Amino acid sequence: MSDEKFDIAVIGAGFGGVYAAHRFREASLSVVGIDGASGFGGTWYHNTYPGSRVDTDSVDMYSYLFSREIYEGWVWRERYATAQELMEHINWVADKLDVRRLFRFDTWLREAQWSPENGRWHLETDKGDVISCRFLVMCTGNLSEPKPVPFPGLDRFKGEWYTSNRWPHREISFKNKRVAIVGTGASGVQAVPVVAQDASHLFVFQRTAHYAVPARNGPHNIELQRKIAANLADYKESVLARATLPTGQEDRKKALEYTPDERRARMEKQWAYGGHGMAYVFEDIGTNYESNEIAAEFVRKKIREQVRDPEIAEKLCPDYPLGTRRLILEIDYYDCFNRDNVTLVDVKCNPIEEITETGILTRDGTLYPVDIIIFALGFKAFLGAIDKAGVINEKGQTPRDIWARGPRTVFGLMTPGFPNLFHTTNAGSPSVLGPLIVQNEFHCDWIADCIAHMEREGYATVEATDEGADIWSGKSAAVSENMIRRQVDNYMVHVNADDGSRIFQPWGAGMSTYVPEVRAMTARNYEGFAFKSPPAQ
Ligand SMILES: Cc1cc2nc3c(=O)[nH]c(=O)nc-3n(C[C@H](O)[C@H](O)[C@H](O)COP(=O)(O)OP(=O)(O)OC[C@H]3O[C@@H](n4cnc5c(N)ncnc54)[C@H](O)[C@@H]3O)c2cc1C
């Protein structure tokens, strides 16, 4: 079959895909971009649910840092940008970089097959595009493929239902409606206070109580933006040299090295400042259960202070170590449970049995009658989108086959057995534990440099080796060896059923250790990778 030919295909038009398309075109490669969404935004395009916004500060942790013109040309409206503003921003960036014309939207990649005969990836989309390319770059995101709704009976439901991670791009009114939000992870916690304002009644279905700390949203810090812009390249390098630490935690000590008063003062200061710092407030919070419990109990006490009904407050208090699942930032979440129109439904002991024509039925026989259901159930993290894209190597294997016992990559960027296939910000890199825009920049720069190296040396393919994946898995395991969060079940931990071994999937020690490792192995003549020349004609 005749196909369209490109040097490189970029799948995904989020922050990663937009930078990738720009970076590769600047490297004189012919680029095609593909996204199933109808426009730019990536996961933000799909996640415009009420209250959706970032939970890392936009000014220093959630901005592109590769171009001063772009960095200082956009003044964020708030400390934490909303999904709507992120969409506006990324469209503005795409036009500034003139990459819009490289992308095809409303187009899902459904099959990608490596052909060793001609050293190309062969792609097919649901729109019937047939494309071949030398390099395939999956900027498909680590939190973009929705988990399915698991409850029976949904097809019978006579009301409206939505998922937070495929939110429709039209106005949805909750006025005078009885609404259910199922799921109290980051998205549910963001949506609850916004929906509660309009709904006649809101039922919040909680399976696991999570730690949510104040975001302290507020105005954008323009002074900081100017300061960063003045030395942007240095600032970017400092982010790449940073542990997973939010600003303000650099001088921390172990919990027991403070006096009780000092400890309390430190936690109060962090509480007042808001943000992720609470999960990093002591040096040993991630490795020492006793230290962790001090901070965990501090947060629980704050929850009890905010929620008037002690029984409800207790149900909202988490029982796992703080920061072992992603800490949630909240704006008026706990206060909602003091409202007459909000009911917390605890589905841990009393799970959802089914969806009926009129509402949600729990195991004890209670029917919660609602007009609208919002499912906020999270994502198939890391490989979810790549599974769906139908990526297959010459042996008919998928990346998940290779990852059967946990992520098997070099740098989180390439999987052995998949030549010329890159997956940015995936497990094996800091991924969801680091600032994702700058990680995408770092990865796309690495890919562009690697391709330039191949052009200079006359190579046709690059592939992560098995030996390289062994080395990288060993390094990754070592940095997360003592982390408490490796012992707590959550989407970041891969557990092997046969021997119970627990693999922490992201690189657990932040950019400060990751970036030097990547640079050192690359400088050692691309240790962990094998290059091949084209077959002789
Ligand atoms: C609600 C929410 C809040 C977040 N907050 C933060 C935060 O505060 N800080 C932070 O650093 N990160 C945050 N993240 C993580 C976020 O995923 C990244 O910040 C960033 O958006 C990732 O960009 P990306 O380009 O790598 O991938 P994504 O933005 O995930 O984009 C992937 C794109 O690939 C497309 N795609 C997938 N499969 C296919 C296919 N087969 N064919 C065609 N297209 C496909 C999807 O449609 C999507 O548009 C948040 C994520 C969510 C959902």
Image (cartoon, rainbow, N blue to C red):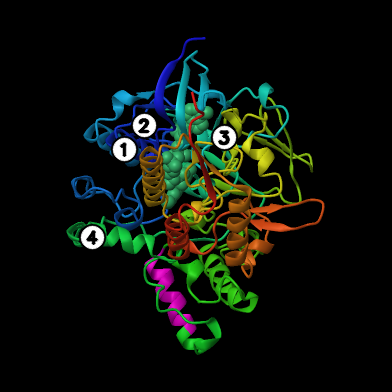
Give coordinates of residue 427: x percent, y percent: 56, 49
Going from the N terminus, do you reach mark 4 or mark 3 first? 4
Give coordinates of residue 386: x percent, y percent: 57, 35
Q: Work out whether residue 40 or residue 534 is closer to the camera in this orientation and state it.
A: 534
**Residue 339 colored in magenta in the image:** no
Q: Does residue 324 appear left or right of residue 335 in this picture?
A: right
Crowd tier of the residue under label 3, counting other residues whose Cα lies within 10 Å: few below 14, some 14–19, many 20 or above: many
Give coordinates of residue 196: x percent, y percent: 48, 44
Crowd tier of the residue under label 2, counting other residues whose Cα lies within 10 Å: few below 14, some 14–19, many 20 or above: many
- Find residue 13 and report its image quarter: top left
Which residue carries the number 2 mark? 40
**In front: label 3 or label 2:** 3
Confirm or reject: label 3 Cβ below 8 Å from ligand 1.
yes
Say above or below: 342 vs 301. Answer: above
Going from the N terminus, do you reach mark 3 or mark 2 first? 2
| Distance of label 1 from label 2 (alpha carbons) | 7 Å
**Residue 272 colored in magenta in the image:** yes
Which residue carries the number 4 mark? 228
Going from the N terminus, do you reach mark 1 or mark 4 first? 1
Going from the N terminus, do you reach mark 2 or mark 4 first? 2
Determine contact: label 3, label 2, CB under 8 Å: no
Which residue carries the number 1 mark? 90
Q: Is residue 167 visible?
A: no
Residue at 78%, 57% (x, y): give it: 500
Confirm or reject: label 2 Cβ below 8 Å from ligand 1.
no
